[in-house]
Amino acid sequence: MLAIFDHPGVIRVVESPLMECDIMHAPALSSGVLVEICVESVESALAAFRGGADRVELCADLGSGGTTPSAGTIALTVGALEIPVHVLIRARAGNFLASELELQVMRYDIATAKAAGATGVVFGLLHAEGSVDHKLMRALIEEARPMSVTFHRAFDSVADPFASLETLIDLGVDRVLTSGGSSRATEGLDRLARLVDQSAGRIIILAGGGVSEQNLKEIVDQTGVREVHAGSSVTRLWDCGMRGTGPERDPLPWDLPIAVTDPEVVRRLVSAAKVLGN
């Protein structure tokens, strides 16, 4: 037996993450605004599902902006859920340039996500001057198909978002995650609205950056987005109380509380989203 997760709801994985499991079944997708929840563990993915999320973006190390999760995390999450799982493909934290070795890592990780049965992948590469790296993006998109492809918040670092949107449309990217060039979606409403207008159904604008139950209606009403992305706004801190032994010392990184997805907060966000647009 490889792993068992006993949650209210319930998932029990046996033998292999890619073989036999009691899967958490998704309800029929309701109308309204689609809600994607960003998570960095299998447990948080399950919590997002229990809260009614339509889709999860699976990452690691969200404190640095996110990197690719482990193969085990991908396999168990995909094997456990029947809602779409999109996997972040990012070799390291920092800027959105890629060396040849980092590109090889991304190709390997895309293949891993595809083999595990992920519905989509999330990545983005830029040139140093702030334009989309058309050549490298096209190569990765070809390797990713038939999975869905989302261009991540590297988009908020491009020099010309409107020209870059046309580049992504030309590449066949399915959606772009953006806060409208600001740190929070509520600060980029005007640009988000312009991007939605420009997209004209050719690409999905996925609004992210501080999206919460409290500001969701404002974001949707003022921009017209039909998909939103939430992460830190639907988490709570979990402190297991483990401090180790020995003389008193300052906390080490592993002593600190960690952020986990709160299914009740997700549920409230999803409930608010399903009312909008009906």
Image (tube, grey):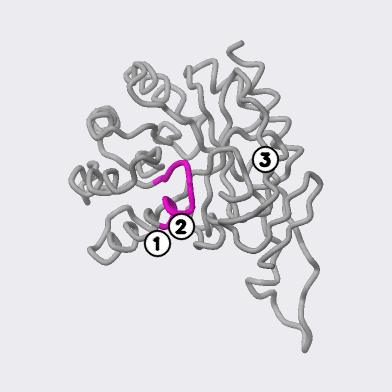
Q: Residues within 10 Å of mark 1 (few under 14, many from 20)?
A: some
Q: Which residue is mark 3?
A: 49
Residue 40 counted in the magenta span? no
52 vs 218, nearest the viewer: 52
Q: Which mark is residue 67?
A: 2
Residue 154 position within the rendered picture, expressed as x and y whole percent measured from the top left = 36, 44
Q: Residue furthest top?
A: 278
60 left or right, relative to 99: right
On the rendered image, what quadrant is the N terminus found in? bottom right
Picture layout, residue 59 above or below residue 168: below
Element at label 3: helix
Does 181 appear above or below 7? above
For residue 163, what is the image quadrant? top left
Q: Position of residue 144 (x, y in %)?
A: 34, 46
> Magenta segment, which residues?
112-122
Q: What residue is drawn where x is 53% and y is 54%?
A: 62
Q: Residue 108's quadrant in the figure? A: bottom left
Which amino acid, mark 2? Thr
Give the farthest residue toward the left. 135
Q: Which mark is residue 92?
A: 1
* CA distance for labels 3 and 1: 27 Å
Q: Residue at x 77, y 83 (%)?
A: 248
Q: Which label's residue is closer to the chain start, 3 or 1? A: 3
Foreground disc of the pair 3, 2: 3
User: Which amino acid type is marked by label 3?
Assistant: Phe
Q: Tag 3: Cα neighbours inside 10 Å, few (<14), some, or many (≥20)?
A: many
Asked if 173 appears above or below 274 in the picture, the reply is below
Q: How far apart are the alpha carbons under marks 2 and 1?
A: 6 Å
Query: In the picture shown, does residue 37 fall above or below 165?
Result: below
- Between the C-alphas of marks 3 and 2, the distance is 21 Å
State if disc 1 and disc 2 touch (CB < 8 Å).
Answer: yes
Q: Nearer the viewer, residue 211 or 205?
A: 205
